[in-house]
């Protein structure tokens, strides 16, 4: 599993050794050495310890993060268990549009499904505009429930008539 490193901890115009960058990011020096094997450019390959500009570390980390991203196509979810873009089982695909606004005209929508590979529940935060693109997929539209759980009657008043009847 890949770890996200904070490139904001690195100064762009500073020159770092591998041990300095490891201490800054709180990682092992072997990790930085692996980055060098993966394409991290150093100032001079012949001199030791290896030195690299902070800007090069930032560029490498940002490129590494971009490679990890999986853009989703229409109708796909990111499955946290599979760690890949997946489609939902068609019978478990629902769209829930809330009354909350996203901007001036769009409404918030939750698209729910179940992974077709591992049966993991899936959730995609979206807008009602994106939902229009999903209409051809024959999805089930669910109305958002804004009420509290339970009935509309107050639970504090239950059994009052029984108490009065018991006294008589």
Image: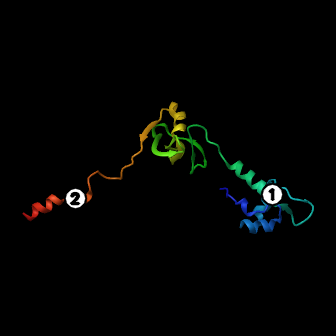
Label 1 Cα crowd, 10 Å radius (few <14 / some 14-19 / many 20+): some
Q: How many numbered tags mark residues here?
A: 2
Q: Is residue 114 above or below residue 28?
A: above
Of residue 144 and residue 77, the one placed in the foreground of this image is: 144
Q: Is residue 22 above or below residue 96?
A: below
Work out which residue is located at the far left of the displayed protein and give it: 168
**SS state under label 1:** helix
Q: CA distance from mark 1 to mark 2?
A: 68 Å
Q: Position of residue 149 (x, y in %)?
A: 35, 53
* Image point (45%, 44%), residue name: 98
Residue corresponding to mark 2:
157
* Image point (64%, 43%), residue name: 71
Image quarter where the C terminus lies is: bottom left
* Image point (67%, 48%), residue name: 69
Q: In the image, which disc is placed on residue 12?
A: none
Tell me if 58 is positioned left or right of 89 in this view.
Answer: right
Work out which residue is located at the far top of the displayed protein and give it: 136
Residue 106 in view: yes
Of residue 160 and residue 103, the one placed in the foreground of this image is: 103
Image quarter where the N terminus lies is: bottom right
Q: Quadrant of residue 3?
A: bottom right
Earlier sequence position, callout 1 versus callout 2: 1
Residue 27 in view: no
Q: Position of residue 86 (x, y in %)?
A: 57, 42
Tell me if 34 is positioned left or right of 158 in this view.
Answer: right
Tell me if 87 is positioned left or right of 19 in this view.
Answer: left
Q: Quadrant of residue 6?
A: bottom right
* Residues marked 1 and 2 touching at CB (< 8 Å): no
Q: Position of residue 143 (x, y in %)?
A: 41, 41
Residue corresponding to mark 1:
55
Q: Position of residue 139 (x, y in %)?
A: 47, 35
**SS state under label 2:** helix
């Amino acid at each position: 599993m890949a770890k996200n490193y904070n490139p904001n901890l690195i100064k762009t115009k500073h020159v770092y050794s591998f041990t300095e960058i490891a201490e800054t990011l709180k990682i092992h020096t072997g990790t930085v050495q692996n980055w060098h094997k993966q394409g991290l450019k150093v100032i001079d390959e012949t001199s030791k310890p290896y030195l690299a500009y902070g800007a090069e570390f930032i560029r490498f980390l940002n490129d590494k993060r971009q490679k990890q991203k999986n853009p989703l196509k229409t109708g796909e979810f990111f499955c946290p268990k599979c760690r890949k873009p997946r489609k939902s089982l068609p019978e478990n695909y629902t769209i829930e549009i809330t009354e909350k606004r996203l901007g001036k005209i769009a409404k918030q929508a939750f698209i729910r499904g179940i992974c077709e590979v591992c049966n993991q529940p899936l959730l995609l935060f979206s807008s009602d505009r994106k939902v229009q693109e999903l209409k051809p997929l024959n999805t089930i539209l669910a109305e958002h429930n804004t009420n509290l759980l339970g009935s509309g009657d107050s639970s504090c008043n239950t059994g009052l008539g029984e108490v009065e009847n018991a006294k008589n």
